[in-house]
Image (spheres, rainbow, N blue to C red):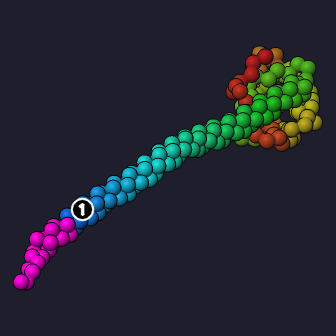
Amino acid sequence: MSITINLLAWREERREQHTRRFYTVILLLLIAGIALGSGVSHVYQRMLGAQEQRNVYIAAHIERYTHEISEAERTVLQGEQLRQQLTRFQRLLQQRTQAAQLFNNLAASLGEGVVFQHLEQRHNRLSVSAAAEDERQITEQLRRLAEMPGFDIPVLSEMVSDPQGSGRTFHFEVTLTQPSVSLAGSGVSP
């Protein structure tokens, strides 16, 4: 009698175990792959979020610094405008002082009996019309004006006797030796 061992059932069972193990390993690998993929995705999302926060932070600082730079440029421009305005004011103040000095010198040179009727300035030439009672006063006036600082020697251009005999009108020009000053008015009355 021979014993026959049927290994077919055993092989079939073993094949089913291998298949179950294979599917279990595949399932575990699939779960591990999904977990690993979601973990990597999560890490990348966090890194992306951190980078976006840095970008927002940098953009905010860039905007703030841009605003500060524009404020600084505006301040520099205002400073330059103020410097120009100050220069203009200083020039006007100097001209005003020179004009006042010019009138003070003219008034100080004014002789007795002489009246300035008209003053006109063109660049550094001053043209004057005046009235006096006689030639002596005219000569004295021209001499006194020549001695005043800021004036060159005056040149008499015209002398006219008053038809009523009450005096003489004379015109002369004098060169200003100070820098040119614009007179506020074109005429001066007694």
Q: Would residue 31 be found to the left or right of residue 10 on screen?
A: right
Res. 120 in view: yes
**Picture coordinates of residue 136, whole percent (x, y):** 92, 27
Tell me the residue at 90%/28% (across/down): 109
User: Taken as a whole, is the magenta stretch helix, strand or loop?
Assistant: helix
Q: Is residue 190 above or below residue 176?
A: above
Identity, as a three-letter code, of the amino acid under mark 1: Thr
Which residue is farthest left? 1
Tell me the residue at 14%/72% (across/down): 10
Q: Is residue 67 above or below residue 39?
A: above
**Picture coordinates of residue 33, whole percent (x, y):** 31, 61
Tell me the residue at 90%/25% (across/down): 108
Tell me the residue at 91%/34% (across/down): 148
Name the element at disc 1: helix
Res. 95 in view: no
Q: Would residue 150 be found to the left or right of residue 57 on screen?
A: right
| Magenta region includes residue 17 | yes
**Picture coordinates of residue 138, whole percent (x, y):** 87, 28
Q: In front here: 118 or 95?
A: 95
All told, the count of numbered labels is: 1
Which residue is farthest bottom? 2
| Magenta region includes residue 189 | no
Q: Quadrant of the N terminus?
A: bottom left
Quarter of the rendering containing residue 101:
top right
Magenta residue span: 1-18
Q: Quadrant of the C terminus?
A: top right
Q: Is residue 172 above or below residue 32?
A: above
- The residue indicated by pointer 1 is 24
Q: Would residue 108 be found to the left or right of residue 185 on screen?
A: right
Q: In front here: 47 or 104?
A: 47
